[in-house]
Amino acid sequence: MEKQSKKDKKKKYARELEDLQQQLVELQRSIIATGKRVAVIFEGRDAAGKGGVIKAIDERLNTRYTHVVALPKPSEREATQWYFQRYVEHLPAAGELVLFDRSWYNRAGVEHVMGFCSEAQYRRFMADCPTFEKLLTDDGLILLKYWLAVDQEQQEERFGERAADPLKRWKISPIDIKAREQYAEYGKARDAMLKATHSERAPWFVVDFNDQKRGRLNLIAHLLSQLPERAPPDKPLKLPKLKGKPGRERLADSHFWIPEAF
């Protein structure tokens, strides 16, 4: 009975996600048609679920107009640039949706807590960030910012799963391991960040991600509510019949075929 219940929950989640993804497709068509520029920032603790929700949003959309940005640590040259510079080139053009898997808020979080930036650099960021985002939104860019919240007990459970699974082990970095002991410090940094950088034009929203599936559904539903315009659904296409018999994939030289493994 318990297994059936889990199966039913899985089916229910899949149905609800598919419905939301259909709405995302309609939203994207509206963004393209109106030439809007939309950037969504995903921040949160390690293992909170940023990658999973971004994948859920992105997987059914037109990749020509949707971009996921997950930048590595800055190069030596980038480290000497204006802090926001390397992010600017990834901002959306007309008709595009950009999803930031972490963002310029690295400076207010991991860099500050783990000592990767100076106190002066941190304070300058906290002072400059609202001005930077005001410039973006005054120019017409739509900016939404989500913090994915997860309790330490749940975070530790996910770290354990990743450590035990060879397909997920790559997700744990040496920084993640060191940061595990800084849970409270990250909370203080988060609070300071939200207070200093929340605004009506560039708001922060906090989503409970202790249950990742529920968190994904809630976040996507909220994102859709923030962008209410929709293009009408596409009408079903009726393909004309092919003339003649269907073709087969043939090569003059069979050398190029790989041997069948299954």
Image: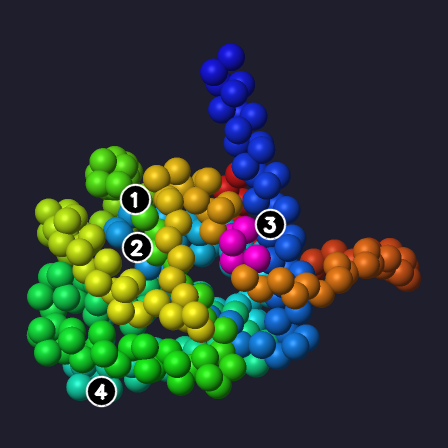
Q: Is residue 219 left or right of residue 257?
A: left
The answer for how far apart the CA atoms under marks 3 and 1 are is 23 Å
- Residue segment shown in magenta: 220-225
Residue 123: image quadrant is bottom left
Q: Position of residue 154 (x, y in %)?
A: 27, 37
Please say whether residue 146 is visible from this viewpoint.
yes
Relative to 128, residue 225 above or below: above
Dot 4 lies on which element? loop
Tell which of 156 and 136 is nearer to you.
136
Question: Between tags 2 and 4, which lies in front?
Answer: 2
Residue at 65% in and 77% down: 34
The residue drawn where x is 57% and y is 57% is 225
Q: Calculate the distance from the C-alpha at mark 2 to the C-alpha at mark 4.
A: 25 Å
Q: Above or below — where is 100 with respect to 151? A: below
Q: CA distance from mark 2 to mark 3?
A: 22 Å
Judged by its main secondary structure, the magenta piece is: helix
Say which amino acid is labelled 2: Gly
As drawn, 56 above or below 14: below
Q: Which residue is mark 3?
A: 20
Q: Check if mark 4's residue and mark 1's residue have beta carbons within 8 Å.
A: no
